[in-house]
Amino acid sequence: MSTNESAETIQEQVVALLPRLRRFARNLVRTPHDADDMVQIAVERALLHLDQWHRDARLDSWLFKILRNAWIDEVRSRGRRAKLFMPEEAGENVGEASMEREIDRLSVEAALARLPHDQRLAVSLVLVEGLAYKDAADVLEVPIGTLTSRLARGRESLAAMLRPPQGDRS
Amino acid sequence: MSVSDESLMAYADGEADAATRAIIETAMRDDPEIHRRIEEHRALRETMQGAFSAVLDESVPQRLIDAARGPDAARTGNVVDLARARRAAAAVDVPGLAWLQIMGEDQLERRTDRRRGPRRGFIQSAVGRPFAGTGCDHRLELSRQNGGLLPDVLIDRCSCKFRTRMS
């Protein structure tokens, strides 16, 4: 970081990325407040280590990586996984959204939450965040072959969980 | 022709190389099943994006914006400098500051270490919002009548582990 001005520019880019960081966190942690806590932890870490970000690297990928690491740390250190995925909390904010859409959304969230961590991360980064395989592999610090394998298995499991029962298929 | 599901997935995601694309497009003409499987991959992608798209339209909490703009930005808001607050506590007996002192350095350090963040960042968090992850609803707020120096403690809804320490 050469000047305060450039640091401020990056901070504003981080602000602009907050909606996507929140969405990614919501893929990992279903309660919105806990998900926002993860984002805050990640952002604070990122600002502490801005000197480690290379300007030729994508800022969003770097932030996703920090968020992913923060989530793994949290799950490992606090053993809170069960608490963070309490399904009864998922439907608190139904609001005025149509019930059918809400049920669909909750079904997808529940199915995603049932995937193993590595598959959930691959699915979230590629299918939800729209990252290229190369960038998603970079975030997860794995070869592209590993990423595509996790993605394929995650997709297969999701498709099976979200497929309507045989009797309901039209 | 047999095409692997990973190749079809890559094709649906726009990640297949030119050679694989040519093979799949040729195979698709002869086998409608391949087309169906590609459409399934695309549909799942749309489903996943749709399920979480509403998050992008939500208002971003101010605490996250403050965190992204760093300590300098937050310092211009409701932030207590601990050393300054302690100097004030030495001169004035204030319940909120007393609690901060009871809570002590060890709590602050432990919290800071867990998040690997700066102590200042934690103190800002403690002042500006409920404690993350503790379920605690109490918070410190600056007493504007005292020039933003002396915090009050709101404990009416507090049920966390700190309550006994405060009462």
Image: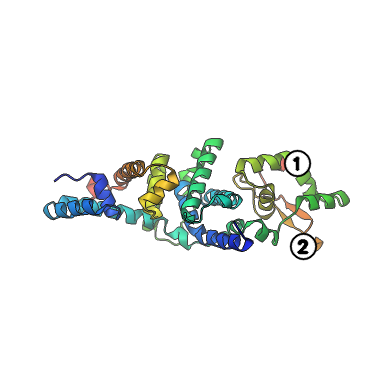
Judging by the rendered image, the residue that carries numbered circle 2 is B144
Kindly state the secondary structure of the residue where label 2 is placed: helix
* Chain of the residue where label 2 is placed in the rendered structure: B
B127 vs A167, left or right, is right
Which residue sits at x=61%, y=46%?
B135
Residue A38: give x, y in percent of width and height. 54, 48
* Chain of the residue where label 1 is placed in the rendered structure: B
The residue type indicated by label 1 comes to: Gly
The numbered mark, 2 or 1, whose residue comes first in the sequence reads 1
Which residue sits at x=61%, y=57%?
B63
What kind of colouring is applied to the model shown?
rainbow
Picture quarter with the C terminus of chain B:
top right
Q: Quadrant of residue B142?
A: bottom right
The residue type indicated by label 2 comes to: Arg
Judging by the rendered image, the residue that carries numbered circle 1 is B104
Residue B89: give x, y in percent of width and height. 83, 50
Label 2 to label 1: alpha-carbon separation: 24 Å
Which residue sits at x=64%, y=51%?
B130
Q: Quadrant of residue B22?
A: bottom left
